[in-house]
Amino acid sequence: MDSAAIALLIAATLNAGTVLAIAALGLLINERAGIVNLGAEGLMLVAAVAGFATAVHSGSDLLAFAAGAAAGAVLAAAFGVLVIWLNTNQYASGLALSLFGAGLSAFVGVRYTQEKLGPRAHYEIPGLADLPFIGPALFKHHPMVYVALALTVALSWFLYRSRAGLVLRAVGESPESAHALGYPVRRLRLLAVVAGGALCGLAGAYLSVIYTPLWVEGLVAGKGWIALALTTFATWRPARVLLGAYLFGGVTMLQFHLQGQGVQIPSQLLTALPYLATVVVLVLISRNPTWIRINMPASLGKPFHPGS
Amino acid sequence: MTDQKKRSLLKLASFASLVATAALVGCGKKEEPAATTPTAEPASGPAAAAEPLKIAFAYVGPVGDAGWTFAHDRARKELEAEFGNKIATSYVENVPEAADAERVIRDMVGQGNKLVFGTTFGYMEPMLKVAADHKDVKFEHATGYKTADNLRTYDARTYEGAYMAGVIAGKVTKTNTLGVVASIPIPEVIRNINSFTLGAQSVNPQIKTRVVWVNKWFDPPKEGEAAQSLINQGADVLMQNTDSSAVLQTAEKAGKFGFGWDSDMSSFGPNAHLGSAIINWGPYYKKVVNEVLNNSWQTQATWWGVKEGAIDLVSVSDKVPADAREAVEKVKAGLKDGSFSIWKGPIADQSGKEVLAQGAVADDKFLHGINWYVKGVEGKLPSAK
């Protein structure tokens, strides 16, 4: 492989990782507050169709992203009310949301399989894009690729350097203590779920408007599940989530490149890789208690009843 | 009611309703009610008074507006237009190639359909099973190779479309590297990759074809990623044997060229689109319905191509040079009158071994068994399942 091909492979990897990164960062916020949302796939599907439809009618990508994020936020809010106030089982509700999202998006999306988006704009950062190797690899991307980077930095700062982040983590670690200190645990959890849903929605809209600019049933094709696996794989750290997303994006792209070069790896194995890696990380975590103490939200998946 | 009780009741009710909605919409197989077109003609004679022939179609993907399933559904609509109230058609989309297929097809028979079309290779075993249980129903299976007394197969020579696309690709490419996004490594798909390459080599001996397998018929993001990786590896004209327009759209985005497959996809990539290799199932479907209506239906295997009007290359772009258009027209005419064969020796496989001697013409058995690449295709063939 020559250096130009490597630069293009890096570019394709960043592209492929961006959808996963944005969705997984959203889920990370969720899980840091103690809520597991297995509905990510459904959220992303509904947001993808909402974003695509908005892009078709308005012609504006920005509006489409907003619509996707809003759709994700609304669905996540419904899920949040169910699990936080009505104390339904988080896992069962999440799975139901996933099925519901798949069905709803297919139903709403039927007429949009006929639609096409206009030609997509090309982006490059003036000056930097002309650099040899680095230019084509890093500086010719849709702005959303950089948004994912910025989000990671912002989220790291928020979680570890800001007071609000400390409160959010407290809500996920020990809701009872947070409650005793006078924090509105349930409202904060809902806020985290809505924020997470909005990011999943943004990822879905990016997928249907920019990454694969079309709508077909089942467009998300498991990316929501991979994002869920990623948060665990990354042991709930934003920077590792981003790296993990690029890793899995890179594995997909590398597989295609290797095929073109005549090297064969069973693609089924690669599809299973994120989940296998997640299982390995879970095993490692459970063998090393300090990892759990440091990273895994202690109340993840557990309901909280104030005053009980 | 105590507060605690009320809460758990509410909980239960809301959860139940969410699950119920999910179940309702989640298994959203859309079944179009049998279209009963009212006709202006007054019913007369015993034939018109008879029950319409109920025909059901099982589709592997959504109908959408492009690709394999779309092409089948277009033919279904042609049937409705042609036969009016003599038939009643319905379809089920997104029927997976697994146990579900048998359930759906049994259900179609249960609903009184007397003619059932299964439109993907993976329905072969399920259809055989259902056919054995329902001798009074006629089954038509696309692209399979097993038949029964009441089950017959039909297919289109898609490789003829691939060859014509190859002729254009060979003339248009600047890098002499073509790319194919391939679905599942079965002879049909391998034959198309080879034919595309042979077509390109017929006008440009320098051609190399790179192939990337996605192991799916329909996964647009993955198809797009595969297309991008082919472009990154120097391919400037892409072809695909997958169902969506994602490959063409990726070519459009990257400023490269591509083709439509199974149906006319020109509107998905106005700049990238060089032509669409389409399948027209209409003539065959009309023949089938006629045979069932006049009781002359018999089991057989049908493989139609350009000659019968089942395959064509349409919407050829203005960007295609005139000599390439002429070459395609010549191929088309030759296929129509039988004077031209795509698979005519000498043809060598990837290793250079001659598989078809000088002057020898491949028969259908040979074509059905192709599980190797011709010379000029790069990479290794994954082992077929």
Image (cartoon, coloured by chain):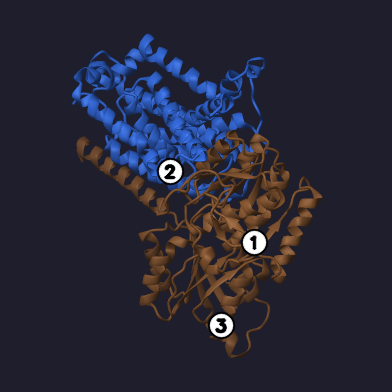
Chain colours: A blue, B brown
Of label 3 and label 1, which has the lower sequence position? 3
Residue identifier under label 1: B342
Mark 3 residue element:
helix
Residue identifier under label 2: A101
Q: Nearer the viewer, residue B153 or A42?
A: B153
Image depth: mark 3 or mark 1 in front: 1
Q: Nearer the viewer, residue B112 or B290?
A: B290
| Residue appearing at x 24%, y 22% in the figure | A298
Residue identifier under label 3: B293
On the question of residue B135 being in view, the answer is: yes
B364 lies left or right of A268? right
| Residue appearing at x 33%, y 27% in the figure | A233
Question: Is A139 above or below relative to A302?
Answer: above
Kindly identify which chain the residue marked by label 3 belongs to: B
Kindly identify which chain the residue marked by label 2 belongs to: A
The amino acid type of the residue labelled 2 equals Gly
Are the residues flagged by discs 2 and 3 from a single subunit? no
On the question of residue B34 being in view, the answer is: no
Residue B327 position within the rendered picture, expressed as x and y whole percent measured from the top left:
76, 56
Q: Are marks 2 and 3 in contact (CB under 8 Å)?
A: no
The amino acid type of the residue labelled 3 equals Leu
Task: For marks 3 and 1, give the CA distance.
Answer: 36 Å
Question: Looking at the figure, which quarter contains the C terminus of chain A?
Answer: top left
| Residue appearing at x 60%, y 57% in the figure | B347
Please, which residue is most extreme toward the right here? Answer: B322
| Residue appearing at x 51%, y 82% in the figure | B298
Task: For marks 2 and 1, give the CA distance.
Answer: 47 Å
Kindly identify which chain the residue marked by label 1 belongs to: B
